[in-house]
Structure formats: C-alpha cells, structure tokens
Image (tube, rainbow, N blue to C red):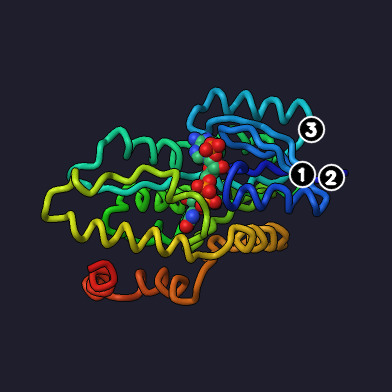
Amino acid sequence: MSQVALVTGASSGVGESLAPLLASRGWRVYGMSRRSVDLPGVFALPADISDAEALGRAIGELKAREGRLDAVLHCAGVGGAGAVESMPTGRARRIMETNFWGSWNLCQSTLPLLRQSPRGRLLLVSSIAGHMGIPFRSVYCASKASVIALSDSLRLELQGSAVQVSCISPGDIATNSIATQYRQPAAELDPLYRARYQRADDAMAANVDHGMSASHVAEEMMRILLKKQLAPHYVIGEPVQKISTVARRLLPARAWEWILGRYYS
Ligand SMILES: NC(=O)c1ccc[n+]([C@@H]2O[C@H](COP(=O)([O-])OP(=O)(O)OC[C@H]3O[C@@H](n4cnc5c(N)ncnc54)[C@H](OP(=O)(O)O)[C@@H]3O)[C@@H](O)[C@H]2O)c1
C-alpha cells in the first residue's frame, strides 16, 4: 500500500518541487496551500494553515479519503522585512500567524493521524535565519526560531511513539518568496535606519536570486525523509551558511555580532 504524504506550500518554491517529486516515487501526495494546485500526481488540498478550523476540515477530508498519513513536509512559510521600530504590527503578526501558529495548527491537526503510522515523519522547514537575528528581518527570524523550538519540544514529547520529527534550515533559495512578501518601504523608516535597511534588503533580494534551486532543496528533503533515523536538525546550504549556524553558538556573542554587523553594514 502506498504511503501518504502531505506537503504544505505546494503552490510555489520548495513545496511545488517536492510534492510531484514524492508522487513520482510512488507516494500518494496531498498538496496544501491557500491556492489550489494542479501538479502531476498530486491531490490538491487547499487550506490556510493559520486558520485552525479550515486546516482541520482539510485534514479531515484527507483522513476520510486515505485513512492514514505517513509524512508531513511542512514547507509553507512567509518572509517579511521592516524595522522593529516602525514595521506595522499587523504585518509582523501575519508572519507569526503563518510561520509559528501555522506550524502549531499543522502539528495539532496531523499528529493524531501521524501517530497511527508505523513510520510517521514530520519535517518542519525553518531557516538559517531562525538560528540568528538578522537586521530588519526580526519577525521572520523570530518566527523561524520558534519553529526550531517547536520541533525540539515535539521530538521529546513524541518519545515512545514511532513519529520522527526533524527541523530543516535552508539557506537562500531562488524562489518567488521575496517578490510575494511584505517589505516595508524604506521611506517609512527613520533616517537612522534607512540606508542600512536599503542595503540589507537589496543584499537579501540578491542572495535569494542567486540562491539554491527549489528542486535541490526538495531532493535534499526527500533524502532526509527516507532516512531510517532522522537527526533533530538539518542545514541545507552553502558551507559558509552551514558554518554560520555553528559559529553563532560557539563564538562569544560580541564576536558574532561584530561579524554579522560587518556583513550587513
Ligand atoms: N526562499 C528562501 O530563500 C528561503 C530560505 C530559507 C527558508 N525558507 C523557508 O522555506 C520554505 C519554502 O520557501 P519558498 O521560498 O519555497 O516559499 P515560497 O516560494 O514563497 O512559497 C511559499 C508557500 O507557502 C504557502 N503559504 C503561505 N502562507 C500560507 C498559509 N497561510 N497557508 C497555507 N499555505 C501558505 C504559499 O502558498 P499560497 O500563497 O498559495 O498560500 C506557497 O505555496 C518557507 O517556510 C520559507 O520560509 C525560504
């Protein structure tokens, strides 16, 4: 019997590459995003993950059709840029609603089914930005740090069950994410921040433009999914990006801040 997977963020980027990849390897795949998807071998299951009730209904539909769920690959997420001092709080909350509460809702709605699988797998996508505070991306960094913490807590809570949880932190990926996210107009920022904000935002957009392909990240996630034993964390990216997550923990805080400050000055 085919295994059943749910891929969130299936309408764009990594999720859009990963869902048909899994289907091509024999999985029965449900692709979730707010927009409905039309991908080879993938059943569209549209829902807004920040809406717990709508998400619950969608998972109920999957359960009624399949009666099982073996893997959740949670790629849905949103970015955003602005200064802590002036970014509209509604915009900031929206990022938290999607990245943290959306992940929370997804865990709550899928774990009862995943726990019935003899080989349940839950891969939550965070970001290298979740390992550190990047200027003018504070809410995004906080939201992705919260996904790492959620994943760590969940792994411990699930001891004694067959479900394995892992947190994936990619570096820059060349997707539409910059074009579709909220970026506070530089003119709204106090002159104290304006020039540095513009440079940081331009650098971020250029890094994403030149980032890894979504299909590469999808292949890596597929490889991780098929492992017998999942590690708590995987970082996908350039060596320097991988090293940064370790350096952040090992270096004295001021030394790390100096390095990041130089990078973003
Ligand atoms: N791109 C990067 O450089 C980068 C780097 C590190 C980490 N990441 C993370 O990696 C993951 C994939 O990134 P990506 O660049 O492939 O993303 P993307 O191309 O921007 O696509 C985001 C996906 O999330 C879905 N989504 C957003 N809000 C949603 C909601 N409330 N409910 C359901 N679905 C929602 C979108 O679909 P709808 O709009 O149709 O809902 C879309 O399918 C994200 O978690 C992102 O934060 C990205």
Please tell me the numbered disc located at residue 2: 2
Please tell me the numbered disc located at residue 40: 1
Residue at x-position 74% and y-position 40%: 42
Residue at x-position 11% and y-position 53%: 191
Looking at the image, is mark 2 or mark 1 nearer the viewer?
1
Callout 1: SS: loop
Q: Amino acid at mark 1?
A: Pro
Q: Dot 1: within a 10 Å radius of its alpha carbon, few (fewer than 14), some, or many (20 or more) residues?
A: few
| Distance of label 3 from label 1 (alpha carbons) | 19 Å
Q: Amino acid at mark 2?
A: Ser
Q: Dot 2: within a 10 Å radius of its alpha carbon, few (fewer than 14), some, or many (20 or more) residues?
A: few
Asked whether the beta carbons under mark 3 and mark 1 sit within 8 Å of each other, the answer is no
Please tell me the numbered disc located at residue 66: 3
Total labels drawn: 3
Q: Earlier in the sequence, mark 2 or mark 1?
A: 2
Callout 2: SS: loop
| Distance of label 3 from label 2 (alpha carbons) | 10 Å
